[in-house]
Amino acid sequence: MRFRLPVAAVFLFAWSVAFAQSGLPTPAPELQRGRWPGHWVTDLSVPRSDYAVLLARRNFMLSTKPDRFVVHVSADARYLLKVNGHTVCTGPQWSAAPLWRYESIDLAPWLQTGKNVITLRVRSYGDGGPLSNMGHRLAFMVQGDPGEAGDVTTGMTHWNVIADASTRPFRDERDRLHTYFALGPGESHDASLYPWGWEAVDFDDSAWHEAKAVAPGLPSGAGGESTSWLSPRTTPLMELTPLPQPGVRRAEGVTLSPTFAPGLAPFTVPAHSKASVLLDQGYLTNAYPQLTVSGGKSARVRLGYAEALVDEKIHKGNRNDVEGRQLVGTGDEFLPDGGADRLFTTDDWRTFRYVELKVETGAEPLVVQNFFGLFTGYPFVEKGSFTSDDPRLAKVWEVGWRTARLCAYETYMDCPFYEQLQYVGDTRIQSLISFYVAGDDRLVRNAIELYDQSRIPEGITQSRYPSASAQLIPTFSLFWIDMVHDYWRHRPDREFVRARLPGVHDVLAWYERHLDPATGLLGALPYWPFVDWTNDKAWPVDPQLALGGVPPGGREGGSATITLQLAYTLQHAADLYDAFELHDEAAHWAQLAAQLKKSVTAQCWDAERKLYADTPAKKNFSQHTNTFAVLAGAIDGPAAHDLMRRIADDKSLVQSSAYFSFYLLRAMKKAGLGDEYVARLAPWHQAIAEGFTTFPEIFKGTRSDCHAWSASPLYELLATVCGIEPASAGFATVRIEPHLGTLQRAEGKVPHPQGEIVAKLQRAGTGVKAEITLPAGVSGEFVWGGKSVALKGGAQTIEIP
């Protein structure tokens, strides 16, 4: 059974929502309906499938400064837009053809009476680009709103373009780390080949080429054929904020003061010499490096970036340590031309705590005038909060929020330093943090839609998307359905959820086809049936495919772990179908979930160990299988309480990673052990003690120092410790059941679609005093020690002895 909205309704609904979400201007109605007057344009002399940077200019006159001048801009793959030399925005929003994003921008604030210039720096990556980029040509387009900005529309007006010969890929040191990178290359910028001043109004571009049209501009749904239908941006523009200058930790070949503080006089590297300076931002960040130099013709400046320094064996230690350690990571190269006040930056932002400047001069000395980072990221605003009488939790909150922020750009990202890819497993946890801390669902919606778009003909979603290299982790398709369910619980947005039901059906139908009728469990699963990162020998790495994290039975069939995960998700799907009165569909999935739980219990419950085994062979046991047994309701009540208490500290089981701890601790809460949550944060406290300023991918021997799935305490401090969760769909009603554990006092604030929820909690012996504030019109209940008190909109005080 499949459910479809009419095509016209889909596009009308999607466009109206997109404009509202991004906060950007809405195009004129005629641009929303049919073919645009403008075209994609490029420099035909530049190979369109190679790494290249294209510079583009459009000069025009204005008799008066306009009140409004809206343009719609896109590029393949990326652009930087300036007006009269002032930076306006970067784009387009990360997306995937055939729906390619564009930005609607009002340029009026940057325009002036008389001569004006709009400039675009357009970049394509070729085959060596970041996997998160799915561009396939070097081109751009600017469409002016009719009657306002037609004088700048590409394909109808004269744009001058030239290839930037100064920029080429740079081979940095990342290979020395012997790990997986999904980023594009470093950048080399040769100042002697750069057309300095090209963004100024009076720059002479007469020797440049005229941009040539290569394809029409078509909005989504217009026409039957397009490589890139244009779809409006759905998220706000990214933040750009200058960071404080980093401190100096080490200098060789030049004498510097111990800090690189604002106002510090420039330093000089003499001619025919070498120098290196190690800078420490003090915390991990994402930023465009901003290096200003003068002189130094024929010098070479290399910038290296790292999350942490490493020893001679390329091992990380305490992230604050510098002595006896070196920087090995990503990097860029700048070649000065001897000019004054040359500002070098990169087209792509970098992730770093440490930056190393390595300078080698020629016949001229080089003056380093300044270095700082220009922070960029999704413009989340911290609206939620948590405080308590345990000061350590304030640091967990701070580090967790930085982690979440660095893993959010135009999509969510698993990690900013190594991959910058949006994976479903990470994104589900990131989405809950976005709801609870920022009250912002735009990146959540974007992720859910992109995963839905990514589904292959078989029905399942890709595990990461956008991605130039398709990757399939079937278990992540289940978490995508859980994300849709989370969205339904937290947002009153029925039409968005309704539009996902066909995709939900297709994913579940794929799993239904992979059931083994002989066992009632899942049979052999193709692709990469990943569950969790673990080094336990019971879950070995496949020697041929070099893929780990797969439980026994995952590939060959008979996995209790994944079968129970399917049962967990099937129940969420049943909720969704019931919510839309599709009761037959809901009953089917609920019945299948019940059958799966019965089959797993019959074949995988070990009565002697009182545990669920990973397979019917009962040779391997993990926290994961037993966690899903509780979450899916295969075991409940006192038996579930006993099970979770035993597995939480049983080191003989395959252990949960930082990622899967989210599900382990959720299961503990469901089993009545929520009061243990605060005491379970020891790994997070230990990471902070080891100098981490963001939380890592795994807690021991991590590759990535920043992985948002490890920021889950931000959500749980509010949802479990303060106990604030939806009691009905759309957060229409609220249930507050605190689990203070060892805390005497806690206060949490959660942004809600209708306002904010505040819970101030104070222990009173074995009881509690609570000051609760709900948005007007929102009701709910407060639960403590099995006692329930009704809540209503506004402020109220509750005392339960």
Image: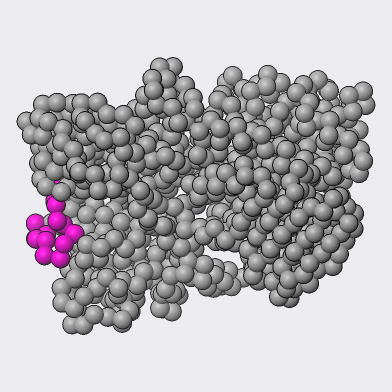
Q: Tell which residue pokes out farthest to the left in this image.
A: 363
Residue 195 shown in magenta: yes
Q: Quadrant of the N terminus?
A: bottom right
User: Which of the pair 651/794 is nearer the observer?
Assistant: 794
Q: Quadrant of residue 276?
A: top left
**x then y, percent, for residue 393:** 63, 44
Q: Is residue 733 above or below residue 450?
A: below
Label tally:
0
Residue 741 image-quadrant placement: top right
- Residue 730: x and y, percent? 71, 65
Closer to the camera in the image, 106 or 216: 106
547 versus 776 height, above or below: above
Going 16% across and 62% down the picture, which residue do you hit?
200
Region in magenta: 193-207
705 displayed left or right of 623: left
Against 523, residue 753 (above or below) is: below
Q: Does 790 appear above or below 554?
A: below
Main SS, magenta residues: loop
Q: Position of residue 722 (x, y in %)?
A: 73, 54
Q: Nearer the viewer, residue 516 or 83?
A: 83
Q: Is residue 247 visible?
A: yes
The residue positioned 49% from the left and 63% from the top of the image is 234
Within the magenta stretch, is there residue 435? Answer: no
Which residue occupies the extreme top position in the image?
A: 313
Answer yes or no: is residue 457 visible.
no
- At horizontal 74% and vertical 46% (from top left) the residue drawn is 743
Residue furthest to the front: 765
Where is residue 129 drawn, in percent x and y? Answer: 37, 41
Residue drawn at (27%, 70%), measured in percent from left and top?
Answer: 110
Q: Quadrant of residue 696?
A: top right
**In the rendered image, which quarter contains the C terminus?**
bottom right
